[in-house]
Each structure stands twice: as C-alpha cells, then as structure tokens.
Image (cartoon, grey):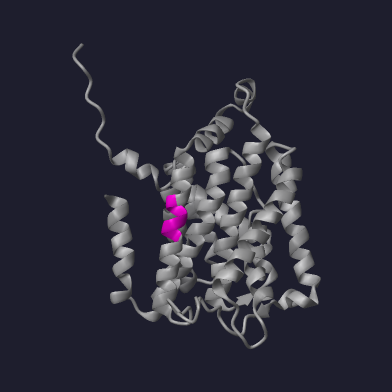
Amino acid sequence: MALVAALAALALFPLIGEAFYLQLVAKIMILAIFAMSLDLLVGATGLTSFGHAAFFGIGAYALFLMSPSYAAANFWLALAVAVLAAASAALVIGLLALRTSGVYFIMVTLAFAQMLFYYAVGAKALGGSDGAAIDVRPTPAIFGWTPFNLGNRVHFYYVALVAMTLVYGLLRRVLRSLFGHVISGIRVNEHRMLALGYQVFQYKLAAFVLAGAIAGVAGFLDAAQFGAVNPELLGWRQSGTVLMMVILGGMGTLYGSILGAFAFTLLQEVLSDLTKHWLLPMGLFIMLAVLILPRGLSGLRRMARPAPEASDG
C-alpha cells in the first residue's frame, strides 16, 4: 500500500509542482533506476562494483553518437542502441572481472571504468574533457505519430516515472524467479551453490549484464534530459555516489534504492544551498545513517512493525 501511495503521489505531482521541481524529481527517478541496477549486483548477488558508472556513461554517450547534428535521433532506436552498447560492455568487462572476487573485483571494475573515463577525456569525437551537447532531444515518433515530447517537462517527467516503475517491476519479478533465488544463494554461499550443480559464473555474468543494461537506460535518459554528456558520467565519483544511494536506502531492497536516491539527492540540494562545504555535513549524515540504521532507510519499515508477542506455551 505504501508503494501504491508513493506511486500515486508521484503521478499527481505535476499538478502542483513547479518546473524546477519537475526536472529535479525526474532526475531523481533516473538516478533511482541507476541505483536499482547497482542493487541487483550489490544487494542481490553480493558483487560490489565500483565501476558501475561505466555503463551509465555508455548509455549517455550512445544517445550522443546516435543524434545527428541539429536533428533528432529516433528515441526507440537510440534507446535500443544504448541498452545494447551498455550490455555488450558489461559482458566484456564481466567476463574478465568476475574471475576475481572481493577487493580484487572492486579494483578491476574501477580500473575498467577509469579506462573508459580517460578514453572519453582524450577522444575529440566525444567532446573531450569538456563533453558535448545533444542539439535536439530524441523524438519517439512511430510511423508519424508522436506519443510524447521529451522537450516538454511534464512529458519527460512521466517518461521517467514509467521507466522507473517498469524497471522496478522487472527487477522484482527477476528476483522472485528461480534466477533471483540462485543469485541470492550465490551471495550467501557461493561454494554451496557450486556443490549443488549451479553454473555460478554464468549466473553472476547474467546479473552483471542485466545490471549494465539497466544502467545504460538510466544514462540514456540522463542525456535526454540535460542534452549533454561529459566524461564525469563514467568516473569513479558517479560510481561512488550511486553506491552511497544504495547503502543509504538499504541494500537488497529495490524500494530502498529508490528511497536512497530521493534522500541523497534532496539532501544534497538542501545542503548545497546552505553552504559551499556541503560535502562535510553530507558525509556526517551518511555515517550517522549507517550507524543508526544499518539496514538503511528501508530498515525503518521493520523497526515500525510491532514486536511479536511471546507465547504462553
């Protein structure tokens, strides 16, 4: 019921929200998609990736490369290319990175992301360190019919809302399937899953590719919203930011990633308006949140439940 109420509130928000807040909430919902994709790795599979921004940036740059100069790219074709490019990169990186574990896996994913970051910095075709602009937002025309206009803030808001809802529904279904139970078992005890006959490497690779593809969707929408791309989308700061969202919201709960994206971004907006040294209070808040709420903001749901009564027997 809480999820339904939250969805209804988001659906009605454009009726009262100003243009700035519509853009801000749309941005948060895109980050929520990004956070849910990482939670599939960290919370569900037990793979802590510090290079997840690579796939986010690839999705964004895919839209830039698919956009003609002073003309609009086809939304559906560009989205398919962005997802395919991000998934392909995740497949290649996963084939190498998943042969390691623990801190080595973290460092390998970080290394690949930084390689892509420095490539984007030096590539003139990608705009170099200054990035590049997308002249015209993609058009979703289907045989001459245009179902929505991404240049309209309200239309874009609902596109982001639908995308976030669909990703949540997809990942929830995946995690409740046999595949989801297997990757959960891998997180708990990988050696036991191997002993039971499961191809652990293939399952982890499939989760890694799916997470990369969804991160590509988030990157694509980010580029479509702001009409610009830059190498920072691929950098370690972006990976660290989305990881903090997952931790703040609560790992292993998809709605926790959404909560984390909203809490982190809104707090950042408030603190940055109050002081230019907003990173210090932000860091203190996250540390206190982790200490007080080890399960993240999603843990408040369990704390609010009444304790079970002791039986007389």
Residue 222's place in the image compared with 90, above or below, is below
Instruction: Determine the residue located farthest toward the bottom in the rendered image.
Output: 70
Q: What residue lies at 66% left-to-right and 74% top-to-bottom?
A: 66
Residue 100 x/y as whole percent: 74, 38
Residue 271 x/y as whole percent: 46, 67
Residue 216's place in the image compared with 139, above or below, is above
Q: What residue lies at 63% left-to-right and 88% top-to-bottom?
A: 70
Q: What residue lies at 58% left-to-right and 76% top-to-bottom?
A: 74
The quarter of the image holding the C terminus is top left
Instruction: Determine the residue located farthest toward the top in the rendered image.
Output: 313
Residue 168 x/y as whole percent: 44, 52
Q: What residue lies at 39% left-to-right and 77% top-to-bottom?
A: 154
Indicate left or right for 45 with 90 as reference: left
**Residue toward you, 17 or 98:** 98
Instruction: Determine the residue located farthest toward the left in the rendered image.
Output: 312
Question: Quadrant of residue 193 in the image?
Answer: top right
Question: Quadrant of residue 159 in the image?
Answer: bottom left
Indicate left or right for 10 with 274 as reference: left
Magenta range: 164-169
Viewer can see residue 38: yes
